[in-house]
Image (cartoon, rainbow, N blue to C red):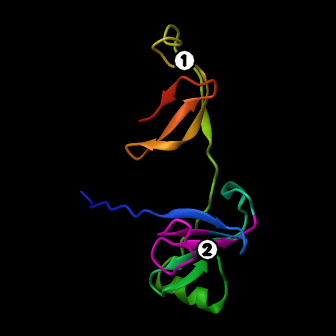
Amino acid sequence: GKDVSYVERYLNQDSKKQCWVISPKALGNPVKVAGSAFVEDSSAHPGSITSSWYIYHEQTKGMFYHGQQDGAALAAARKGPIDKVTSKSIVGFDVSSIPNGTSGIGGVSPGLMLRRGNELYGRPVYEAENGGQYLFW
C-alpha cells in the first residue's frame, strides 16, 4: 500500500488585514511552506469566502491562485499544477428515514445533528439539536 502522512494546518482570520490564513501555526501569518494558503476576503465566516485562495506552490516556492493568468503563474503552472482551495461550511446534518422500531430509547432519533466544538479520537462529534444524543465514528 501507499504510505500516508498527515499535516496539521490551522485556519484563522486576520481581521486587521481582512484575510483568512491556512498555516502551520494557530493565529499564524501567511507563510511560504507546503500546505499553506491565504485569501484576501473580509467575510466573517470561512464558508462565505468568494475570493481566490493564494496557494503555496512547492516547485517555484511562490504563492499563486488557481486560474491566475499572469506570466509568473503561467510559468509556475508549467512546472506543476496550481492547487485550488474552496471553503464550505458544514454545521450538521439531518438524520431521517429511521427504520420502524429503532427510534427512541436505545436507538437513533430523527432530527438535526449539529457539530460540536470537540473531537473524539481526532473525529468530529455531533449532538442532536434537542440534546441528549451524540454521534461520532
The residue segment tinted magenta is 21-42
* Number of callouts: 2
Q: What x and y, as percent, mark residue 52?
A: 67, 71
The answer to whether 7 appears left or right of 55 in the picture is left
Is 41 covered by the magenta stretch? yes
Look at the image and say whether residue 26 sits in the magenta stretch.
Answer: yes
Task: Identify whether 108 is placed above or below 123.
Answer: above
The residue tagged with tag 1: helix, strand or loop? loop
Type of amino acid at the residue the image marks with label 1: Ile
Q: Secondary structure at mark 2?
A: loop
Q: Residue furthest top?
A: 101
Q: Residue at x 52, y 65 (%)?
A: 26
Residue, far left: 1
The disc label shown at residue 66, or none: 2
Q: Which residue is mark 1?
A: 98
- Name the residue nearer the viewer: 3 or 23: 23
Residue 124 spot, x, y in % from top left? 48, 42
* Residue 100, percent from left and from top: 53, 9
In this orientation, which residue lies closer to the viewer: 8 or 96? 8
Name the quarter where the N terminus is drawn: bottom left
Q: Residue at x 40, y 47 (%)?
A: 122
Disc 2/disc 1 C-alpha distance (Å): 42 Å
Q: Say which of 121 and 68 sits in front.
A: 121
The location of residue 112, given as percent across then percent down, is 63, 29
Q: How crowded is the residue under tag 2: few (<14 C-alpha within 10 Å), some, or many (20+)?
A: some
Amino acid on which the number 2 mark rests in the picture: His
